[in-house]
């Protein structure tokens, strides 16, 4: 009686291959989501920068900030929505503009003298999505929350304690 050798894979070998493929798929999905999020943020910042440039060019040519977006030659499109606030109670007048694209918001603030750098998140009082991570993509430590930056004050996102810190008998 002769025994024929059978060739094939064992169930353990097949399970190992399936697990390796699942791990590679998970890594790819996480990377893809991170890259698309960064691209969405970059587009929002670029739109805010371009709109801020249009507003300051309009202010330089007219001597005053435009009262509306239309006066600056801006309007909402299918992919970008804008919110604009003009503050004439200050000298010089200031503005804040929020550009929202694909769910990502960025804002830019300035005056008749020019605009600051755009920052992720909406202007105060505007609707939009605030960032949930720091500029480099890092998260805040446990017990801290992300505070959106302000283009008006040239600040980027930062972390602040979630709860008030108190010294109670030498223990925080």
Image: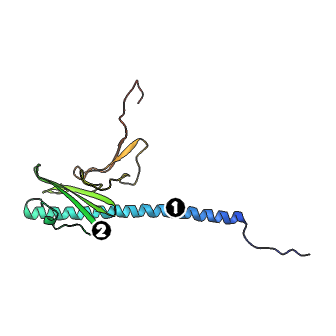
Q: Which residue is mark 2?
A: 79
Is 4 positioned to the left or the right of 67 in the image? right
Could you say whether the residue bearing mark 2 is in a helix, strand or loop? loop
Q: Residue furthest right?
A: 1
Label 1 or label 2, whichever comes before in sequence order:
1
Q: Name which residue lies at 28% across and 69% down.
A: 78
Quadrant placement of the C terminus: top left
Is 33 positioned to the left or the right of 8 in the image? left
Q: Which residue is mark 1?
A: 27
Q: Name which residue lies at 33% across and 62% down.
A: 42
| Residue 57, percent from left and from top | 14, 64
Is 74 positioned to the left or the right of 166 in the image? left
Could you say whether the residue bearing mark 1 is in a helix, strand or loop? helix
| Residue 87, percent from left and from top | 14, 52
Q: From mark 1 to mark 2, how far is it between C-alphas?
A: 30 Å
Q: Name which residue lies at 41% across and 49% down.
A: 139
Residue 117 visible in this rendered orientation of the protein: no
Q: Name which residue lies at 62% across and 65% down.
A: 18
Quadrant of the rendered image containing residue 171: top left
| Residue 31, percent from left and from top | 47, 62
Quadrant placement of the N terminus: bottom right
Quadrant of the rendered image containing residue 7: bottom right
Residue nearest the observer in this picture, 9 or 80? 80
Depicted 166 relative to depicted 81: above or below: above
Q: Residue furthest left?
A: 63
Q: Which mark is residue 93?
A: none
């Amino acid at each position: 009686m002769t025994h024929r050798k059978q060739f094939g894979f064992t169930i353990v070998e097949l399970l190992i291959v399936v697990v390796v493929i699942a791990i590679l798929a998970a890594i790819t999905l996480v990377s893809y989501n991170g890259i698309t999020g960064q691209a969405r943020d970059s587009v929002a910042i670029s739109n805010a920068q371009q709109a801020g440039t249009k507003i300051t060019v309009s202010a330089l040519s007219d001597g005053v900030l435009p009262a509306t977006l239309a006066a600056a030659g801006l309007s909402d499109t299918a992919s970008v929505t804008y919110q604009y606030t003009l503050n004439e109670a200050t000298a010089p007048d200031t503005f804040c503009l929020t550009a929202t694209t694909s769910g990502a918001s960025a804002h830019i603030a300035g005056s008749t003298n020019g605009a600051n750098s755009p920052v992720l998140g909406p202007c105060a009082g505007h609707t939009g999505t605030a960032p949930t991570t720091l500029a480099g993509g890092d998260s805040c430590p446990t017990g801290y929350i992300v505070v959106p930056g302000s283009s008006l004050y040239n600040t980027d996102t930062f972390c602040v304690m979630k709860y008030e810190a108190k010294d109670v008998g030498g223990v925080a």
